[in-house]
Image (cartoon, helix red, strand yellow):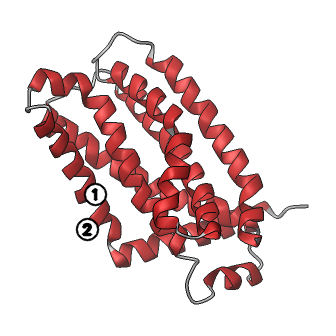
Amino acid sequence: MVDVRRFLGDVRLVAGRDLRIEARSRVVVAQVVPFALLVLVLFGFALDADQRTLGTFAPGLFWVAVLLSALLAVHRSATLEQSDGTLDALRMSGLTPLALFLGKAAAVFVQILALETVLIGGLLVFYGVEVDDPVLLIVAGVLAGVTVAAAGTLYGALASGLGVRETLLPILLLPVLAPVLIAATRAFDDALGVAAVDGWAWTGLLAATALVATVVGALAHGVLIED
């Protein structure tokens, strides 16, 4: 029988460790968030800062900024076990591969949610958009964040095992996240009132991708870190 309480405690332990490291290093606050906001601002300049154009393309630009910035968070998460024999220590600690995967994915998910929150504020300030359906906005953002965190944790482990993760990770991960970019953009089109689409139908696709990414990651992560 699996001790659920101990398992959840292990997940919280791994997630808490990663988040404490990030809190002390301030990589997300000092690097990832400024980079994401800079991407939004540069998009505005590239489109000649036309308010109507910015509002129309705001959902797509938002998710491009999220995915590009999430690569930095995923890369940072993947590097935490690559120094000083940390991964070997985790293996000998009694933590199951599933707990390690879920803990690391949860930590990345928290960082992505924080990033999304800041960038939504950026849309409101820089692009002048208005939120028509906040519930849809939140649900779509959470589901997309789950997918990015789960897939990012899995592919981060894969890229670390293959080496040259700095250049290989985007090549591996971004094509996999293309459906997330499309579905999340369409859901945000509806949530922000930009286009007349069924955002909840696209959110259903996000739910499916989140489930698949989590299940596949949970099954494959242990094999990758053992290799």
- Disc 1 crowd rating (10 Å Cα; few below 14, some 14-19, many 20+) is many
Instruction: Tell me the number on the disc at residue 30.
Output: 2
Can you identify the residue that label 1 sits on? Answer: 33
Splitting the image into 4 quarters, where does residue 105 fall? bottom right
**Nearer to me, 135 or 181:** 181
- Disc 2 crowd rating (10 Å Cα; few below 14, some 14-19, many 20+) is few
Q: Residue at x 60, y 66 (%)?
A: 12
Q: Are marks 2 and 1 in contact (CB under 8 Å)?
A: yes
- 96 to the left or right of 41: right
Q: Amino acid at mark 1?
A: Val
**Nearer to me, 195 or 134:** 195
What percent of the width, then of the height, locates residue 61? 29, 35
From the viewer's perspective, is residue 170 above or below residue 20? above
- 11 to the left or right of 58: right
Q: Residue at x 70, y 64 (%)?
A: 99
- 129 to the left or right of 85: left
Q: Secondary structure at mark 2?
A: helix
- 220 to the left or right of 147: right
From the viewer's perspective, is residue 163 above or below residue 169? below
What percent of the width, then of the height, locates residue 125? 13, 39
What percent of the width, then of the height, locates residue 28? 34, 64
Decide if residue 103 is in sight here: no
Q: Residue at x 76, y 84 (%)?
A: 92
Which quadrant would the C terminus be assigned to in this image? bottom right
From the viewer's perspective, is residue 61 above or below residue 85? above
How far is mark 2 from mark 1, CA to CA?
7 Å
What percent of the width, then of the height, locates residue 75? 47, 64
Q: Secondary structure at mark 1?
A: helix
Q: What is the tally of numbered marks visible in this picture?
A: 2
Q: Amino acid at mark 2?
A: Ala
